[in-house]
Structure formats: structure tokens, C-alpha cells
């Protein structure tokens, strides 16, 4: 079936900056993302919180001075869906969200949906937030991918995840519309507040930003603490 979609993708290469000038083999999870102690909010570095809207419990993790949800958002809101419309996929990978008006690929981006998606006290991350996350990981691209990816669920030729910081990146894929989904087990695509940008975690690399024009990805959301 022919798609009448104009897709413009410009890929930028990040130069990931190491946290220190020392060799990468000295990168330490106990320094960057310790699983004990407290964060800048006075809370445990890793823990759980409850979304008061529906009672769902989410894990979170502290990486540097950022606090990230350690699971994909699964809040059932209008213009969100499960991969392949299968509720079991929502239980594992969270929901996928459209940022277009009325969920229509031919509409403009919906600026009102951004503040309504994440739980109170949390927000959708910006491109700068994602850059900061990446800069906290190893400057070796394959190692950085492993550090963020969950150990399991990924296709075997997409590399092994060590999940050192508890971010647990899931291969949740994306959908072009409610009947056309792709990349489950193969890639993670997260929305950012710029709306035209999304972080791609494919294969062994996470260092790419894809700027997507006139398209309608329904993709995962990872909220960051305000």
C-alpha cells in the first residue's frame, strides 16, 4: 500500500564528551549513577513513584544530576496506542504517543499535548536533556549503547545491554499510524519537546539525532523530573 508521506531525515553525528579527560575504561557507574545515596531532590538515587492519575508505579534512576523514569510511559491518553494495538505490548513497552493534532499525520504538531503527557512533577525531555544523558555515558558509542539498554528483549544482533545506570532502554519501536508499526525489538525512539526531534537507539549506537519532517511517528516517552 502506497504511503503518501513526505519523510525528510537529517542525521547529525554527536561527539560524545567523556566526563573526565581520563581513559574511558575509568568510567564508573558508582560515580555517574550510583544505586545508593540521594539525588539533588533529596530522594533515593533509585526508587519508584506512583502516577496519581491512574495508580501506575514507575521506577526511576538518577544519572548525573538528572532523574529519569526507568520505564516507558504507559498513561492511556487520547492519541496514544499499543504497538500493533496489542495491550500486551503496552504492559512491556509502554504506550506510543502521537504529537500531531488529532493524531493525524497530515496535521501540524500539537503544542498543547506536551505538558499533559507526563505525571505531575515530571516533564517530557528536551534535546538538551538527551544530550546531557549521552554525555554522562561512555564516549565509546557501542559501550554507551550497552550502558543504557536493558539486558534482554533486544534482537540478538542489536547488541547486549549492560544497563549500568538503570535507564533500561527498551526496543519499543515506533508506528507510522495505528496499523503500520515497525522496529519492535530492534530500536528505541523517544519523543523530545522539540517535537520534530527524536532520539534513535539502534543497533549498537545511540549517538544519532534524527530530525523528522512531515511524518507521524507514534513513539515512546521517557519523562524526566522537573
Image: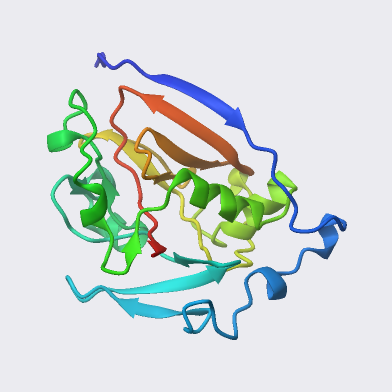
| Horizontal side, residue 193 vs residue 87: left or right | right
Q: How is the image coloured?
A: rainbow
In the rendered image, the quadrant that contains the C terminus is bottom left
**Residue 104, image x, y percentages:** 16, 30
**Compared to 109, does 37 lie above or below?**
below
Count the labels in the image. 0
Foreground residue among 140 and 151: 140
**Residue 175, image x, y percentages:** 30, 37
Residue ID at (30%, 55%) = 89
Write down the quadrant of residue 216 in the picture: top left
**Compared to 26, does 172 lie above or below?**
above
Foreground residue among 2 and 166: 166
Residue ID at (60%, 64%) = 163
**Residue 167, image x, y percentages:** 52, 63
In the rendered image, the quadrant that contains the N terminus is top left
Residue ID at (21%, 35%) = 100
| Horizontal side, residue 18 vs residue 114: left or right | right
Foreground residue among 191 and 154: 191
**Compared to 154, does 214 lie above or below?**
above
| Horizontal side, residue 148 vs residue 107: left or right | right
**Residue 155, image x, y percentages:** 53, 47
Residue 155 visible to the viewer: no
| Horizontal side, residue 112 vs residue 129: left or right | left
Amino acid at each position: 500500500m502506497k504511503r503518501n508521506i513526505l519523510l525528510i531525515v537529517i542525521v547529525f553525528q554527536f561527539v560524545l564528551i567523556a566526563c573526565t579527560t581520563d581513559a574511558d575504561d575509568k568510567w564508573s557507574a558508582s560515580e555517574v549513577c550510583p544505586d545508593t545515596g540521594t539525588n539533588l531532590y533529596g530522594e533515593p538515587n533509585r526508587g519508584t513513584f506512583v502516577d496519581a492519575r491512574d495508580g501506575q508505579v514507575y521506577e526511576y534512576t538518577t544519572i548525573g544530576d538528572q532523574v529519569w523514569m526507568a520505564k516507558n510511559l504507559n498513561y492511556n491518553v487520547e492519541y496514544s496506542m499499543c504497538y500493533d494495538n496489542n495491550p500486551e505490548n503496552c504492559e512491556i513497552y509502554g504506550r506510543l504517543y502521537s504529537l500531531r493534532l488529532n493524531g493525524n499525520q497530515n496535521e501540524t504538531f500539537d503544542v498543547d499535548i506536551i505538558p499533559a503527557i507526563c505525571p505531575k512533577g515530571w516533564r517530557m525531555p528536551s534535546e538538551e536533556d538527551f544530550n546531557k544523558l549521552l554525555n554522562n555515558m561512555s564516549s565509546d558509542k557501542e559501550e554507551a549503547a550497552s550502558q543504557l539498554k536493558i539486558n534482554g528483549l533486544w534482537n540478538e544482533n542489536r547488541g547486549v545491554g549492560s544497563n549500568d545506570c538503570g535507564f533500561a532502554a527498551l526496543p519499543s519501536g515506533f508506528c507510522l499510524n495505528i496499523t503500520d508499526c515497525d522496529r519492535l525489538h530492534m530500536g528505541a525512539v523517544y519523543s523530545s519537546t522539540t517535537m520534530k526531534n527524536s532520539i534513535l537507539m539502534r543497533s549498537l549506537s545511540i549517538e544519532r539525532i534524527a530530525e523528522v519532517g512531515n511524518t507521524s511517528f507514534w513513539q515512546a516517552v521517557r519523562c524526566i523530573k522537573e
